[in-house]
Amino acid sequence: MDRIEQIRYLNRILLEEMPEYHSLAVQISQDEIAQRRLLRSLMNVRPPMPLRRDFVTVQDELLSAEREEKGVVEVSALPVTANPRIAVWQGDITRLNADAVVDADNSALLGCFCPCHGCIDNAIHSAAGLQLRDECNMIMSAQGHAEPTGRAKLTRAYNLPARYILHTVGPIIYDGVTQKDREDLASCYRSCLKLAAEYNLSSVAFCCISTGEFHFPNQDAAEIAVKTVSEFLRQDTSIRKVIFNVFKDIDAKIYRNLCGENPTAEAGD
């Protein structure tokens, strides 16, 4: 199958599983861009349930090809900051081949169900594939309750270039940042690093936890992140490199100011 055939094949299976969306789907253009957006939307809204083997095979072929086209970023080659174990990189976290990338989740830990939403949770689940939601569902079903703020869970990364995904729920800010919010955010970073170390991982890429939909102020969140990570890296740990992955220019500026330049880097590096 070529790409458009793969996309239409996957859409057909998902619409068979969720016929309530069929009337909306028939109104969408048949061109590849529109059909690919439909596929992402259907994947986003699909509840956890058994996956057909033929669906997984074609989905993985499509997502793997898209991963290679976007380009895998080698984390070991990223330039470090004043701390030789910390890097700041601006771009799409789903391109990083870190041992683990961090997903900022909600307490259900099942991924974003809003079609094509711009959050990091949606991006990671959309690029990893539907197996990720199913694994998260197994974890949460066994747990039997919502995921508390500040903890961490680990899953496979499926079609991402990373090996694993660390899932954490950050604090939601309503009427100003409290001391508990600060402690909970620090706990997110600490819990992810501890869990990564338990699995003997060597590199972890963090998104900007809680600064998007959860409204934690960017500067405050970055200061907590850098302080917590720096303190953790002073311990004897398997983790050799932490990447602060940023998407927005404002976060890139904040993290680079906080982390400092690599004093050994030459101009233009």
Image (cartoon, rainbow, N blue to C red):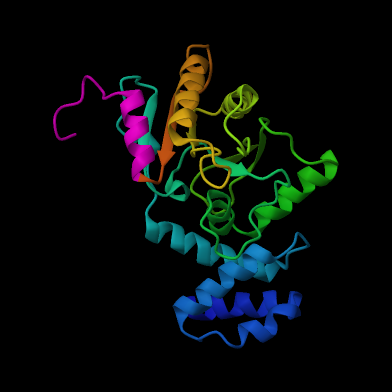
Instruction: Name the residue nearer the viewer: 193 or 239.
Output: 193
Q: How many marks?
A: 0
Left or right of 259, for residue 180 = right
Q: Quadrant of residue 214?
A: top right
Residue occupying the point 74% across, 75% down: 18
For residue 80, say whether it is visible. no
Query: Which residue of the protein is positioned furthest toward the front in this rendering?
Result: 175
Q: For this view, does 208 lie left or right of residue 121?
A: left
Residue at figure coordinates x 61%, y 88% from the top left: 26
Residue in view at x 66 percent, y 33 percent = 152
Rendered location of residue 32, percent (x, y): 46, 79
Where is residue 161? Give x, y as percent.
Answer: 48, 48
Q: Is residue 41 above or below residue 133?
A: below
Viewer-closest of 243 and 168: 168
Split into 4 quadrants, where in the image is the C terminus? Answer: top left
**Picture quadrant where residue 75 is located:** top left
In the rendered structure, the answer to whether residue 148 lies left or right of residue 126 reads right
Where does the image place residue 248, in percent across and percent down from the top left? Answer: 38, 46
**Is residue 231 among the parts visible in the rendering?**
yes
Magenta region includes residue 237:
no
Q: Residue at x 47, y 19 (%)?
A: 227
In the image: residue 82, left or right of residue 63: left
- Give the x, y percent position of residue 33: 45, 76
Query: Residue 265 colored magenta?
Result: yes
> Residue reaching furthest left?
267
Observer-nearest of 173 and 128: 173
Q: Which residues are magenta?
A: 249-269
